[in-house]
Image (cartoon, rainbow, N blue to C red):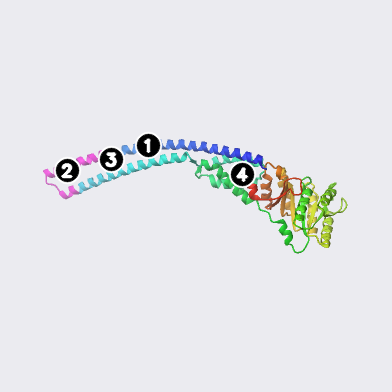
């Protein structure tokens, strides 16, 4: 499962790591240039210090001359002492400045070497750098049927994590994986317990309507759900409300015969809502626990189909409305789920053929666009090939 997506992500992680290393090398070169500039400034400051030293020498000579004159002639000693104090104070100030310059020079050299060392292991990305790196990951996600709304959510988180912040090159892949995991954890919803929901309803029967287009494995999946319920000692009735597709009733009857459960049916072309109504009435009279309603699956863009589904829903007043789609159809499954959800309002999702889905984007995207949980994954043709959705397991399958 998800072999194609995992390989693609592995390649993307490697490319991003290489690009970050190149960026780091460029930053190191820039720091070395900064070091040269610092040394140049240091030489300039040394020259200024030499000039101050020369000035000090002149002042010292002046002091000595004054002392000599003081011995030879009678002058105002107080005035000379004040001038002498000023010269001494200036001399101390120059010495203090000399010490500070040396300390600054020492700190400057230490800082630049430390920065170069850090740049060999870390780097920073500005917004332009980030956009270039993310583009590769974005294309990979799009190729694997991940919806744009999901990609935007991932991009926002990565931008907050990486832009203008120190990045350890050795940790780049693990940090990207962490963000992907965090985003998928927020998007994917752990399913409710279907068996518990059915058993907790006091007034029977519990009614579930299944929606989805033809060819998605809807009828077979309904049989798998009936088998699961039967294993949990719940009595089912099937409603053959797909009165449009040729052989749909016979297909449902064949499954029911194998499972040993009843099918309520009318003639082809009959009102699907009436079939569902009769199935519910039968279940009440016969003391059945649950009614599973199969529906027609013409193209999801057909307005008449949506109106038909709305009518069935109004008449049967279901406890759950479940969309069934093929995982391998990618964005088509996402669009179908979105259309049924907007028109009818679904409560959960079952994705078929998940065992042969190499991309996995549909699972992520369908949860995002509908904000509904995936309840089960179809993983084969046998009645037991219905796996309860586990988001932690799915995330691990994609990222490991």
In this view, 12 is above or below 194? above
- Badge 4 density bin: few <14, some 14–19, many ≥20, Cα 10 Å: some
Quadrant containing the C terminus is top right
Pointer 2 or 1: first along the chain: 1
Q: Nearer the viewer, mark 2 or mark 3?
A: 3
- Residue receiving disc 3: 52
The reply to whether dot 3 and dot 1 touch (C-beta < 8 Å) is no
Residue 106: in magenta span: no
Disc 2/disc 1 C-alpha distance (Å): 41 Å
Image: magenta residue range:
53-81
Q: Quadrant of residue 355?
A: top right
Question: Is residue 139 something that shows in the picture?
Answer: no
SS for callout 3: helix
Disc 4/disc 3 C-alpha distance (Å): 66 Å
Percent position of residue 46, x then y: 32, 38
Residue 63: in magenta span: yes
The reply to whether dot 2 and dot 3 touch (C-beta < 8 Å) is no
SS for callout 1: helix
SS for callout 2: helix
Pointer 4 or 1: first along the chain: 1
Q: Quadrant of residue 173?
A: top right
Disc 4/disc 2 C-alpha distance (Å): 85 Å
Dominant secondary structure of the residues highlighted in magenta in the image: helix
In this view, 390 is above or below 34? below
- Residue receiving disc 1: 39
- Residue receiving disc 2: 66
Q: Is residue 39 left or right of residue 356?
A: left
| Residue at the far bottom in the pictured view | 202
**Disc marking residue 399:** 4
**Disc marking residue 62:** none
């Amino acid at each position: 499962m998800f072999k194609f997506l995992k390989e693609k992500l592995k390649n993307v992680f490697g490319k991003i790591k290489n690009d970050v290393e190149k960026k780091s090398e460029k930053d190191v070169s820039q720091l070395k240039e900064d070091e040269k500039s610092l040394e140049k400034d240091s030489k300039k400051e040394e020259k200024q210090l030499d000039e101050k030293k020369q000035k000090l020498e002149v002042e010292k000579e002046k002091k000595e001359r004054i002392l000599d004159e003081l011995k030879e002639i009678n002058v105002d000693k107080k005035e000379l002492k004040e001038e002498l104090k000023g010269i001494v104070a200036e001399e101390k100030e120059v010495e203090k400045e000399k010490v500070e310059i040396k300390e600054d020079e020492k700190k400057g050299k230490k800082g630049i070497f430390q920065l170069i060392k850090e740049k060999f292991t870390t780097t920073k990305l500005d917004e332009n750098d980030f956009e270039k790196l993310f583009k590769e990951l974005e294309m990979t996600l799009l190729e694997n049927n991940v919806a744009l709304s999901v990609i935007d959510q991932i991009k926002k988180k990565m931008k907050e994590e990486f832009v203008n912040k120190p990045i350890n090159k050795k940790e780049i892949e693990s940090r990207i994986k962490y963000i992907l995991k965090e985003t998928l954890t927020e998007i994917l919803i752990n399913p409710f317990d279907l068996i518990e929901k059915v058993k907790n309803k006091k007034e029977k029967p519990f009614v579930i309507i299944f929606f989805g287009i033809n060819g998605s494995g809807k009828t077979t999946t309904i049989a798998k759900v009936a088998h699961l319920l039967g294993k949990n000692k719940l009595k089912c009735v099937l409603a053959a409300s797909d009165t449009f597709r040729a052989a749909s009733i016979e297909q449902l009857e064949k499954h029911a015969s194998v499972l040993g459960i009843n099918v309520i049916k009318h003639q082809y072309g009959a009102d699907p809502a009436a079939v569902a109504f009769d199935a519910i009435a039968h279940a009440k009279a016969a003391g059945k626990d649950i009614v599973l309603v199969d529906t027609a699956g013409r193209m999801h863009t057909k307005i008449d189909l949506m109106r038909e589904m709305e009518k069935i829903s109004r008449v049967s007043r279901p406890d759950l409305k479940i969309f069934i789609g093929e995982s391998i159809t990618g964005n088509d499954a996402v669009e179908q789920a979105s259309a049924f959800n907007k028109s009818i309002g679904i409560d959960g999702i079952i994705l078929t053929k998940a065992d042969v889905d190499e991309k996995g984007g549909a699972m992520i995207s369908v949860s995002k666009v509908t904000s509904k949980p995936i309840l089960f994954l179809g993983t084969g043709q046998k009645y037991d090939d219905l796996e309860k959705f586990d988001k932690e397991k799915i995330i691990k399958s994609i990222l490991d």
